[in-house]
Image: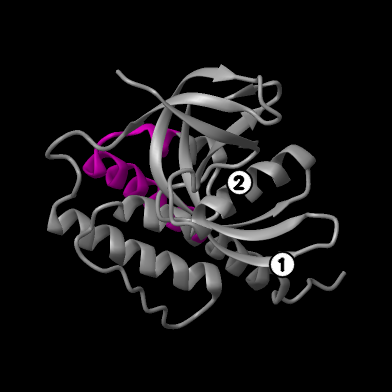
Amino acid sequence: MSAEWLPMLPLPLVLLPEELLPLHIFEGRYKQMIGECLEAKAREGPGQEFGLVQAKAEAIESIGCAARIVNVTNRYPDGRFDIVVIGRRRFEVLYANEETAYLRCGVFFFEDEPGAEVAGESEAACAIELFQHLLRRLRHAKDMPVHLSRPYRYLSFRIAASLPLDLDFKQQLLAIRSESKRLTRMTRLMEFLLEKMNQADEARKKADGNGDLPRKLS
């Protein structure tokens, strides 16, 4: 297992492949790191990516996602950046090097297991239907068109990136190396969320109905 060096940005969040994420870069060492990534981007050379890994207390998770800068939305006079990044390759942290101003880690990039990169058509169709229904409920919209182009590689990540999910769940999803298994987890979660929303609606209707009952005169 050969390692590649990757500059690292530990944050209390989880980035998924193909997920867009806005970031505000204000700390000196990370301003330097992002500046170096932007220089690499300008010359279209290596070094454009940095690793985004979930920070927990004094530790970091061992699985993260490489990020690439899509756009700089604002540059401040003091050197701060507002940027938008996109999730790229997943990696496993093998070891760390703190000799530079910012954390660098030796990482192993990985993909899904061979033959497990794409879920079946019926699995994908079921997940997309649930996703569309859930978005309508969350956004209180009668219609919510969903455009998820084929092939459905990373479909689970694209769905997860659009939902307000628990960080631990996203972290677990990031580590799974089978699209079918990830999509099964997402489908079960969406079914659970819809059921909870239906139960809340029923409870609300009953509460509203109780308020309309005539009071008994004493």
Residue at x 56%, y 19% (from the top left corner)? 96
Residue highlighted by disc 1 = 74
Position of 214 with respect to 217 (left or right) is: left
Residue 11 is drawn in which quadrant? top right
Residue closest to the eye, 122 or 72? 72
- Look at the numbered disc 2 and give the secondary structure of its residue: helix
Asked whether residue 55 is in view, the answer is: yes
* Residue 79 coordinates in the image, percent (x, y): 79, 54
Color encoding of the figure: one colour
Quadrant holding the N terminus: top left
Is 46 covered by the magenta stretch? no
Quadrant holding the C terminus: bottom right
* Residue 142 coordinates in the image, percent (x, y): 45, 83
Hey, what amino acid is under mark 2? Glu
Callout 1–callout 2 Cβ contact below 8 Å: no
Residue at far bottom of view: 142
Q: Which mark is residue 128?
A: none
Q: Which mark is residue 36?
A: 2
Asked whether residue 61 is in view, the answer is: no
Is 184 covered by the magenta stretch? yes
Residue at x 80%, y 62% (from the top left corner)? 76
Magenta region: 172-197
